[in-house]
Amino acid sequence: MVRLFFTPQCAYTISPYKWTYRLSLGFIESWPDLLGVAKMAQERGGYHFDYSGIAHATRPERTGQMRFWRWQWSEKGKKKGKARSYHFPECDYLATLVALLRVRGELAAAEAVAESAQQPLPEVQLLALPDPYDIYNYSYDKEYTYDAKQCLRMILDQRDFALATQRAAAREGFGVEDGSRLAYRDDGTILLTLQGGHTQQVSEKLYGHLLQSAQEEVEKWTASH
């Protein structure tokens, strides 16, 4: 079965946590030029890679929102179906960008981005501590699968290992902040209903294994640091 490792890649814990802040931080940090991202935000532009992209929404009914899109992938690493598009509040993206600019010492750029916002920005802080509930802080061995990724995401998005363990012991279904839901079935599988209504059936055994492994890996990393 897949082996899981806690290998922090993101140096920050977002406070207060919100999934749209984490989504924003992932896009912002993946672009090689932080000041370039700040400039694009002030110009209300966007940027993209081969597999995903983000931009200020341009349609009148989407005013005040960011649009991001990403391709869906098969387990063999091939594009599967059409790119899925989603929208979330523009203020969440800009607040995360301002927070990162401040942490990096780019105070003038942070102020310029904040002033360009069309509405007041929420207060977001980036604490200098790897987040144990950030999926990007985990790596896998060669047995990694798409099922494993979705199981781990649902575990971490509960933001509480003790609560996740309690729910798993009781086979209790739940939902997370981005609208995804998990439900136990009688045949030893779990049905995941993901963002946009996409469904994925996964092994309950795999879910339990990853829940235990994630906690053990975080405990080992914490003990050694």
Image (spheres, rainbow, N blue to C red):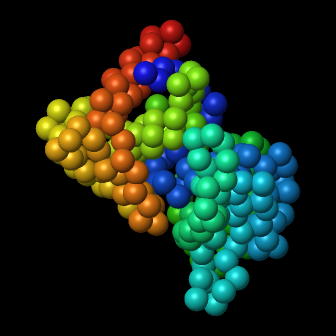
> What is the total number of numbered labels drawn onto the structure image?
0
Quarter of the image containing the N terminus? top left
- Examine the image and state in which quarter residue 54 appears: bottom right
Q: Residue furthest bottom?
A: 60
Give the vertical position of 53 relative to 104 (above or below). Answer: below
Q: Residue at x 40, y 51 (%)?
A: 200
Q: Residue furthest top?
A: 224
Question: Of residues 137 and 149, which is closer to you in this image?
Answer: 149
- Examine the image and state in which quarter residue 167 appears: top left
Give the vertical position of 12 relative to 157 (above or below). Answer: above
Whole-percent x, y for residue 197 in the image: 41, 65
Q: Is residue 222 visible?
A: no
Whole-percent x, y for residue 55 in the image: 72, 69
- Examine the image and state in which quarter residue 63 appears: bottom right
Give the vertical position of 93 relative to 151 (above or below). Answer: below
Q: Residue at x 34, y 25 (%)?
A: 209
Q: Residue at x 14, y 38 (%)?
A: 170
Whole-percent x, y for residue 121 in the image: 58, 67
Q: Residue at x 47, y 23 (%)?
A: 2
Question: Of residues 225 and 157, which is closer to you in this image?
Answer: 157
Q: Residue furthest left?
A: 170
Q: Is residue 183 visible?
A: yes
Question: Of residues 202 and 210, which is closer to you in this image?
Answer: 202
Whole-percent x, y for residue 129 in the image: 55, 30
